[in-house]
Amino acid sequence: MLYWLLYEKLYLFFHPFRLFRFLTFRTAFASLTALLIALFIGPWVIQKLREFQIGQYVRDDGPQSHLKKTGTPTMGGILIVIAILVPTLLWSDLSNPFVWVAIVSTLAFGAIGFADDYIKVVKRRSLGLTARAKIFYQMLAGAAVAIALAVLEQFRVFSTRLTVPFVKQWRPDLLWHIWPTTIPHMAWFAFLPFVVWIIVMLIGSSNAVNLTDGLDGLAIGCTIIAAGALTVLTYVSGNVVFADYLELQHMPKVAELTVFCGAMVGASIGFLWYNAHPAEIFMGDVGSLAIGGAIGTVAVIIRQELLLPFIGGIFVVETLSVILQVGSYKLRNGKRIFRMAPLHHHFEQLGWSESKVIVRFWIGALVFAMFALTTLKLR
């Protein structure tokens, strides 16, 4: 909106506005705007959540030290979503289709989380959406993103070829180009592997962030690091010079998502101000699912989803710990691998303080993200 006004309309009358054509300049402004929005409206959001008595419910089977957190305002992810989307609408080129794909995906996954939180907190039920219902709605959201990208592929502004880390030339295409032309009414099957792949990536990403959100500031701190890595990856993927030098797929229009990623960094830093230990507000599912959906969507658009295990390394480790714990319990007659899952609770049970677990997991997230960025040249 401001990009359209200041650059496309007012640039001819006031030449310094030409700065707004630079992507890095608008990304910095989006990040700063998101930070300020989160900082300034944070207290108001916290107060409103308290007035509506939207407090966190802490399960009895969790760490006993967490029981004191009962009643802390939750559903603070609304603040994160607002702080991401408003700067994106202000500073990005809204004629870019990828910006709208990211916005709609974030809203869709955030809406699923909002419904889950609303049922649990407002309706005072121990469980929100059923697991089947949540996965079903996530599948619908993922399918919508996949279909939108498949349409953009037909207009040659998007590529369905995967970028494989450490490999220069091999870029497998997720579209089936060998489908017989004699049965064109079945041609939609060509998109099936791509659609399934996108759905799996987005469901995995959103639920991984959700599982990590168990300690004050843990998930949002890891989000800052992951979003920062995505900002770099998005910029180089859309820049012809860097993409050619690093032998990446060059898709010029995806560069505009750098503004969205910068807004995610700023919003996450602003939310961390209130979510740092001891937390004044929790993000809830509305925040964790929205963040996970946004991270996954950006990764698939820039064709770096195979780097997601490193971009969001801690999210993946936390998810694997839950899978291993559940699998061990069912297959080994009740035997557990960890004292408690997800993994951050295991270290709490070992005697680590909450602050120590959080900071050390942040360090781990930073190491993972730095490794993801090094793969750009290790090809």
Image: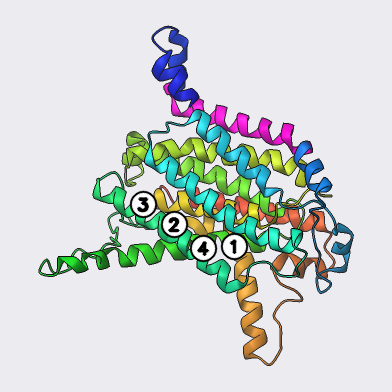
Between the C-alphas of marks 4 and 1, the distance is: 13 Å
Residue 58 appears in which quarter of the rendering? bottom right
- Label whose residue precedes the other's in the sequence (4 or 2): 4
Q: Residue at x 52, y 53 (%)?
A: 108
Residue holding disc 1: 208
Q: Residue at x 21, y 65 (%)?
A: 187
Q: Are marks 3 and 1 in contact (CB under 8 Å)?
A: no
Above or below — where is 32 with respect to 217?
A: above
Q: Secondary structure at mark 1?
A: helix
Q: Secondary structure at mark 4?
A: helix
Mark carried by residue 148? 3
- Is residue 241 or residue 237 the one in the foreground? 237
- Label whose residue precedes the other's in the sequence (4 or 1): 4
Q: Amino acid at mark 1?
A: Ala
Q: Amino acid at mark 2?
A: Glu
Q: Position of residue 263 (x, y in %)?
A: 57, 37
Q: Position of residue 140 (x, y in %)?
A: 46, 62
Above or below — where is 81 with respect to 68?
A: above
Q: Residue at x 69, y 58 (%)?
A: 118
Between the C-alphas of marks 4 and 3, the distance is: 15 Å
